[in-house]
Amino acid sequence: MAVIAGNWKMYMGPAETRAFFAALQVGAAADRNELIIFPPTVSLGAAVSSPDRDPRVQLGVQNVHWESTGAFTGETSAIMAAEVGAKFALVGHSERRHVFAETDEEVALKVVAARDHGLVPVVCVGETLDERRADRVEEVILRQLRAAVSALAGGQGRFLIAYEPVWAIGTGETATPDDASSAHQTLRAELEASLGIAAALRTPILYGGSVKPSNAAELLSAPEVDGVLVGGASLDPDSFLGIALAGGG
């Protein structure tokens, strides 16, 4: 079973969200894979209430604040997202880190907030092109992972990791299956060292970065790749379904 997650970013308003679920017929793809959609916050309610959404397609929120309430204009708390119907929360997405200057410390706080309010954190890690060229991939992704894992230490509940090399997001460039496997093996080894073998083995590690139906099967068949975090290709129901079907069973 693979995890097939779609991050809609700042696309798909409520009307488009309802139309997407009316067109998405997941069929057997949802029996052999775990399907998750992360709509924009303003469309989360439309996704939850859509009469056409197959209940096997789970929902998440793209970002949360670490405080439950407060004078934080424009932010959404984990408790609010959970009340609307989210089950998952993206934390530390590359665009949050590199566009909005989100720090490892803030990511750790958000991980705790998500977990404490019943959301499953999907912790994103990944290097920039400059960091990759400087041979700093392992250094960067381990630093990011350790910040999140330290926040989870001693806590209960599930979480996921998404490796998304920044240079492969929205660029058309894609890490090779070997690139993905290498990074995922590094992350898995760190999880084993930090949390133990059992916890490491039950933590899915997803690959994200220009995933589409034409390359999904090859990426999903790579060692240590437990699923994919899909951007633009998740906006079209047929494309998303094609990726989900590539997950096999």
Image (tube, grey):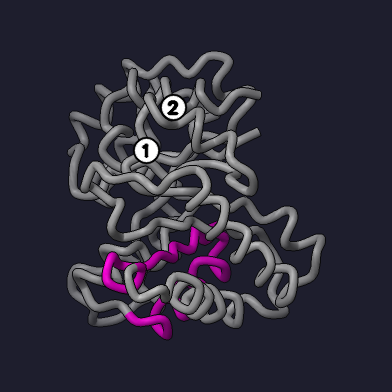
Q: Position of residue 240 (x, y in %)?
A: 38, 27
Q: Is residue 134 left or right of residue 199?
A: left
Please report the residue visible at 60 percent of the width from the left and 65 percent of the height from the top: 186
Please report the residue visible at 58 percent of the width from the left and 40 percent of the height from the top: 222
Q: Amino acid at mark 2?
A: Ile
Q: Position of residue 29 (x, y in %)?
A: 55, 20
Number of dots carrying numbers: 2
* Comes first in the chain, label 1 or label 2: 1
> Tags 1 and 2 in contact by the CB under 8 Å rule?
yes
Frontmost residue, 181 versus 227: 181
Frontmost residue, 179 versus 144: 179
Residue 112 can be seen in this image: no
- Identify the secondary structure beneath mark 2: helix
Neighbours of disc 2 within 10 Å: few (<14), some (14-19), many (20+): many
- Identify the secondary structure beneath mark 1: loop
Residue 210 can be seen in this image: yes
Please report the residue visible at 53 percent of the width from the left and 75 percent of the height from the top: 142
Q: Is residue 130 left or right of residue 246?
A: left
220 relative to 90, above or below? above
Q: Quadrant of the N terminus?
A: top right
Please report the residue visible at 75 percent of the width from the left and 62 percent of the height from the top: 199
Which mark identifies residue 79?
none
Q: Position of residue 2 (x, y in %)?
A: 60, 36
Q: Which residue is mark 1?
A: 211
Q: Position of residue 151 (x, y in %)?
A: 57, 80
Q: CA distance from mark 1 to mark 2?
A: 8 Å
Which mark identifies residue 243?
2
Q: Quadrant of residue 248?
A: top right
Boundaries of the magenta span = 103-132
Q: Quadrant of the C terminus?
A: top right
- In magenta segment, residue 63: no
Q: Amino acid at mark 1?
A: Val
